[in-house]
Image (cartoon, rainbow, N blue to C red):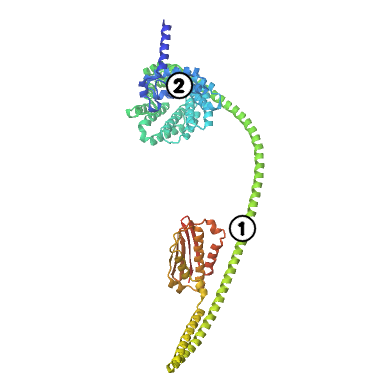
Amino acid sequence: MKKVQLLIFLFMLNSTSVSSQISDEFVKVLPPQYRPHNARQLTSEEKIKLLDSAAFIAPPQYRVELKKLAFLVRDEMNSTTDIKLKIEFATALGQFYNNVNIFLLDTSIAYCNKAIEYAHLPQFNKIIALSCFCNSSSYSIKGKNDSAIYYCYRAINYYHAFNDTVMLIHCYTMLSDIYYVNSLCEKSIFYNNLVLDMIPNKWGRDYTFNYLQRLKFFIRYNSISPSKQFADTILKISGEIFDNTKQQASSWYGSTFCLLGRYYYDIKEFQTAIRYADSSLLPKYVQNDLYFNVSAKKISRDMYLIAVGDTLLGIKTLDSLPKPAFYLRKWVSQSLYWYYAATNNWKQAFRYYNTYIQNLDSLRLLEISGLLADTEQKFNVAQKEQEIMKIENRNLLRQKELNQVISISLILIMILALTIVVMVGINRRMKMARSLEKQHLINELYKMEVTVLDERVIQQDNLTMQRQKIASDLHDEISTSFAAFRFYIADLEARAVNTETVEVLSNLKAEAQSIYQQARLFMHNLHSSHENKSYSVKHLIAELTGKFQNNKLLSIKSDINCDEIISYLNPVTEKELYLIIKEAVTNSIKHANATLIQIAVTFHNHFCYFSITDNGKGFPDTVKTSGNLGLNNMNNRMQNINGTLSITSNNWGTEVKGSFPV
């Protein structure tokens, strides 16, 4: 009958799981990030997430629902053919049974081993690492420290490969606890130091917790091998905790007091130990304590009371402890032994001393098993290192051969590159030589042009001077002669009585006046310099502005003072300025597509300043450096009259400006 009822119950449980995987009430109490989209139909990811975090997010009254979910996940794991999903389900179940109930640790280990069995490919190494860590935790709680150490080292090897600092901290913390339980305090302190070095936030929650671990390890070390050095270290560590956690005193001071009580108990200052235990149980240090719970603090205080004579409490505690609780049984037996020995009750003292020794021997056996596990792990590591060395040697030989090939290839590439560099250098030198030769020819041509122009100017000046001298001589001679001739005709005309004679003299007088006017015009033309007019800046600007005055495509505007140009410029400087303005305007019209050209000439402090600006499209910098003949001519003209010239060009136009002394 009972079997039938059980089958009916299991059927109902299974049907309930299928129809409603978790209740709405359970969903409401979950943190937002853990709530499923549909409580009636959980996805595989949601199930795994819930089982992984069950111990931290689920209130105790909902553990039954989580167990039902675990059964459902187990069935899915057995039925699915997706190896990745099988591994994730097995790992989640292992985590779940490890976290929710210490009596289900064997189940946790079984599922973690399944995950390790399934995860035989390298891409699942992270899952293997997590399963090894979970197994180490389960074996540690069960007191099977050799297995706990084995799996912890396996996890560490994986997490080292992943460079996962967070999980390495967890592994080292677990190892330090395992070695502490086995009284291997030196190893506990070693791994605790690794943890403290890896935590970045000094005196944060994790760092302070592990610093309290450090204090606990040194107190145990001092109880095994008392020394002044250990005593000083214990007091120093506790002082550092007090100094650095003042802002969080309610979280850490109570546990520090509790550990100091244990230190004073070990050196048999029982009253001091009781005072520290009482301080640790003050309400302000109980509620927010992040290291010891109230039960642990009360157990410590009971030990101290037993040591000062509360034997009934000691006997009651000893009888209530399970036999595998070797450490607590040793502690109670030690307290009773100390008390009876201090009161000379040697019979009872001997009795509890035997109990103390029995539990101590059991702990030493655990210690030996831990050492054996550690030795075995080191042996396995040594074997792996030998295999790795063999593989590395083979790889080194291959790498050496590859390096030789790479070296030869690099040498050939370097030779080729060097050849290319040399060829490019020779080519550049040839180009530079041709460019210099070209520039030299341009300069020679310009010098020849300047020389010819200078000779022409000198010849023109000489010719002008000769013409002016001839004009002056003619003016002086002809003006006087014509004046006398006109006076003579006028006198004859006045004395003539014949009408015909008067008319002839009048005509002769008019003809003489005409000849005189023509002679004056000839002398004036002979005196004037037509060459100077051809380089007149004034006439050039007037011609340009007038020519483009009514042009719709281009306008030329000027800002000059004609009187200043006549006053300050000599023929040479005016010629050079004339040619520069003409060249700049010509370039702008031909190349710039400008709609406005502005010409300005001013004089200040014996210097002439000029600028020719347009709003055209400009030209690239390469034009200035490519040996453009027109631009070079402008620069050379300025140098000839000790002036400076600059050319600025961009997308908004070009400006040619310069200055020279006058």
Residue 103 image-quadrant placement: top left
* Residue at position x 49%, y 89% in the image: 481
Position of 640 relative to 425 (above/below): below
Foreground of the two, 636 or 25: 636
Q: Earlier in the sequence, mark 1 or mark 2?
A: 2
Q: Residues within 10 Å of mark 2 (few under 14, many from 20)?
A: many
Left or right, 386 with reference to 297: right
- Element under disc 1: helix
Corner quadrant of residue 600: bottom left
Q: Position of residue 572 (x, y in %)?
A: 52, 72
Q: For numbered disc 2, what is the local secondary structure?
A: helix
Instruction: Between residue 379 and residue 18, name the one nearer to us.
Output: 18
Compared to 496, does 629 lie above or below? above
208 or 90: nearer the eye? 90
Asked if residue 297 lies left or right of residue 112, the reply is left
- Structural distance between the alpha carbons of marks 1 and 2: 82 Å
- Identify which residue, 514 or 445, lies in the foreground: 514
Q: In which quarter of the image is the N terminus?
A: top left
Task: Tell me what residue is drawn at x 57 percent, y 76 percent.
Answer: 459
Q: Where is residue 616 in the image (x, y as percent from the top left)?
A: 47, 57
Seen in the picture, residue 399 relative to 14 is either above or below; the reply is: below
Residue that numbered label 2 is attached to: 98
Q: Can residue 417 be seen in this view?
A: yes
- Residue underneath mark 1: 432
Residue at the spot 65% in from the left edge and 32% down from the top edge: 394
| Furthest-left residue in this view | 283
Amino acid beneath label 2: Asn
